[in-house]
Amino acid sequence: METELLSVVAGSHGREAIARAASLLRAGRLVAFPTETVYGLGALALDPAAVAGIFAAKGRPSFNPLIVHVASIEAAKALVREWDDRAQAFAEAFWPGPLTLVLEKAPSVPDAITAGLGAVAIRIPAHPVALALLEEVGAPVAAPSANLYTTISPTTAAHVLKSLGGRIDAILDGGATPIGIESTVLDLTGSVPVLLRPGAVGAEELSRSFGPLGHPSAMPEESSARVSPGQARKHYAPAGRVRSFSSPESLGGLLAGLGPGARAGVIARSARPEWASVAAWLQLPDDPAGFARQLYGALHALEDAGATDFFLEEVPASAAWDGVRDRLSRAAG
Ligand code: TXA
Ligand code: MG
């Protein structure tokens, strides 16, 4: 199929582009759209055939559940069995925003969305284009990151086109996404909230207002979302061999071991030392938010530059870097 490009950024066609994207979604088609974290691949969440299209386009295994995006807390309530005070408090504190809440699902939510689990993941995104689109669609929209399974998530429309061009109906181009890594996923099905995926909202920020968080391994047997099945070890991975390094000295050793045809690409917070002969060295900001914003773009850029070997500098062990550290370790498999 031909993938339609609908631009919100270029010129005065924003409204028309969003209206076109919404009408495609309402017709059961697949449309990628920007959120504040990464681009999502949208389809009507309550339409099992449309949802099946997401899994087919991404090559995503059916055991990996999807996040449902809504425009209001009212719309979220309709998707869950019970909306309690705790869900209300998290939603009021963090929505619209990069926090996904996992709650026992309502019967109307198809099994394909939850991969057969009894719980559904929901968020209200904070991107103006995403919100306008959701309002125009008037129904919940399921959206995983808009990339082929296990590959690098997209932070621009060009990244989506590279991964899913020809496989989806349209891409709504709203420019680069401001946060750059995926939402934090928090399970609220048990007595203690459990962090299933670190992300844009830090664990410290969550526990400051709501007390300590549990760990996935400590979740009770009866919890329906005991595991976050999407958390495959290898994820967000560029095409090539990926390794991490802790210091310029250790990188030196790794580079010395490369074969003659290798093209090394480095992502680091530090500047390139004189001696490092590599095909590309991308220096990212030395703060977690700035680093997150540019990480996937840097991985895509090295991939596009034909890097065969990716070297990722380790980031600090502090909680502020949790989301970034998780993505770096998964990129390395
Ligand atoms: O920022 C984001 O969350 C982006 C944008 C597009 O919203 N979406 C995203 O979706 O990252 P995806 O499909 O790439 O990641 C969804 C994550 C996976 O780790 C999945 O296992 C978890 O959410 N998840 C979804 N439904 C769940 C459920 N019912 N129980 C537990 N984990 C769930
Ligand atoms: Mg993803």
Image: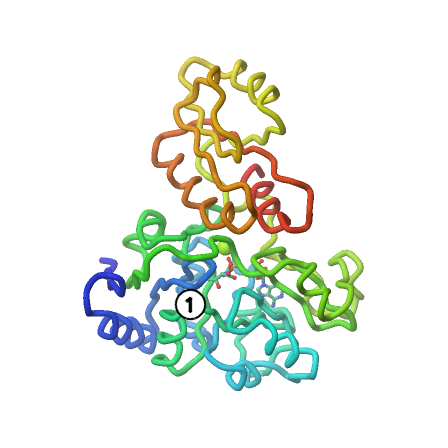
Q: Residue beneath label 1, please?
A: 127
Q: How many C-alpha atoms fall within 10 Å of the one at disc 1: few (<14), some, or many (≥20)? A: many
In which quadrant of the rendered view does residue 229 lie? bottom right
- Taking the spot 35% from the left edge, 53% from the top edge, the residue there is 156
Q: Is residue 101 above or below residue 315?
A: below
What's the coloring here?
rainbow
Toward the viewer: 246 or 81? 246
Q: How many marks?
A: 1
Answer with left or right where residue 63 lies relative to residue 206. left
Toward the viewer: 65 or 155? 155
> Is residue 219 in sight in this rendering?
yes
Q: Quadrant of the C terminus?
A: top right
Kind of residue at disc 1: His
Toward the viewer: 271 or 259? 271
- Taking the spot 77% from the left edge, 68% from the top edge, the residue there is 211
The spot of residue 185 in percent (x, y) is 61, 63
Q: Is residue 161 above or below residue 69?
A: above
Answer with left or right where residue 282 lies relative to residue 92. left
Q: Quadrant of the N terminus?
A: bottom left
- Taking the spot 76% from the left edge, 58% from the top edge, the residue there is 215
Q: Is residue 30 above or below residue 319?
A: below
The spot of residue 213 in percent (x, y) is 75, 63
> Is residue 1 in sight in this rendering?
no
- Taking the spot 44% from the left edge, 73% from the top edge, the residue there is 141
Toward the viewer: 298 or 151? 298
Answer with left or right where residue 32 lies relative to residue 203. left
The spot of residue 56 in percent (x, y) is 41, 58
The spot of residue 302 in percent (x, y) is 40, 34
Is label 1 in a helix, a strand or a loop?
loop
